[in-house]
Image (cartoon, helix red, strand yellow):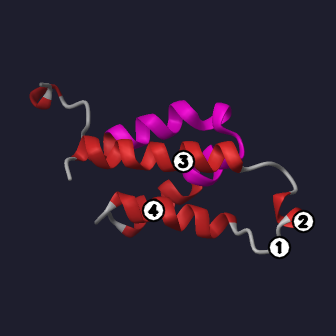
Amino acid sequence: MSDRERADAVLEHLAVLAFLYYPGIEADDPSYSLADDIDWCLARLGDVSDLERERMRALFAGAIADPTATREELFTALVKLDGVLDVDRHE
């Protein structure tokens, strides 16, 4: 899977989770776990350092709970993590 495909997969998963999330979901559905949703997205990142994984964990939590507030920071982090927009790699 290319860097771009990985980044797209992460964003697609986050979009679905953000769409389904609402404040109070834990009370309405005791089986719901934000941590599980975050782990589901982290699995799409592949092999990244523990430091980057923890940074992305925090960004994913924000992206699920409040996508508008975190979307630019998340996109920038994914780009830097995978080099999606490196000039030498444009098609």
| Crowd tier of the residue under label 1, counting other residues whose Cα lies within 10 Å: few below 14, some 14–19, many 20 or above | few
Q: Which quadrant does the C terminus fall into?
A: top left
Nearer the observer, 79 or 22: 22
Q: CA distance from mark 1 to mark 4?
A: 22 Å
| Crowd tier of the residue under label 4, counting other residues whose Cα lies within 10 Å: few below 14, some 14–19, many 20 or above | some
Counting residues from the start of the chain, the first of labels 1 and 4 encountered is 1
Q: Position of residue 13 (x, y in %)?
A: 50, 50
Counting residues from the start of the chain, the first of labels 3 and 4 encountered is 3
Residue on which the image places disc 2 = 27
Q: CA distance from mark 4 to mark 2?
A: 25 Å
Task: Please say if the residues under marks 2 and 1 sit with CB atoms less than 8 Å apart.
Answer: yes
Q: Amino acid at mark 4?
A: Leu
Q: Position of residue 65 (x, y in %)?
A: 71, 47
Image quadrant assignment for residue 24? bottom right
Residue on which the image places disc 3 = 14
**71 left or right of 21?**
left
| Crowd tier of the residue under label 3, counting other residues whose Cα lies within 10 Å: few below 14, some 14–19, many 20 or above | many
Q: CA distance from mark 1 to mark 3?
A: 21 Å
Q: Amino acid at mark 2?
A: Ala
* Region rendered in magenta: 59-79
Magenta highlight: main SS:
helix
Which residue is painted at 52% across and 36% down in the image?
A: 73
Q: Amino acid at mark 1?
A: Pro
Circle 4 SS class: helix
Task: Please say if the residues under marks 3 and 4 sit with CB atoms less than 8 Å apart.
Answer: no
**10 left or right of 80?**
right
Counting residues from the start of the chain, the first of labels 2 and 3 encountered is 3
Residue on which the image places disc 1 = 30
Image quadrant assignment for residue 29? bottom right
Residue on which the image places disc 4 = 42
Q: Position of residue 9 (x, y in %)?
A: 38, 48
Task: Please say if the residues under marks 1 and 4 sit with CB atoms less than 8 Å apart.
Answer: no
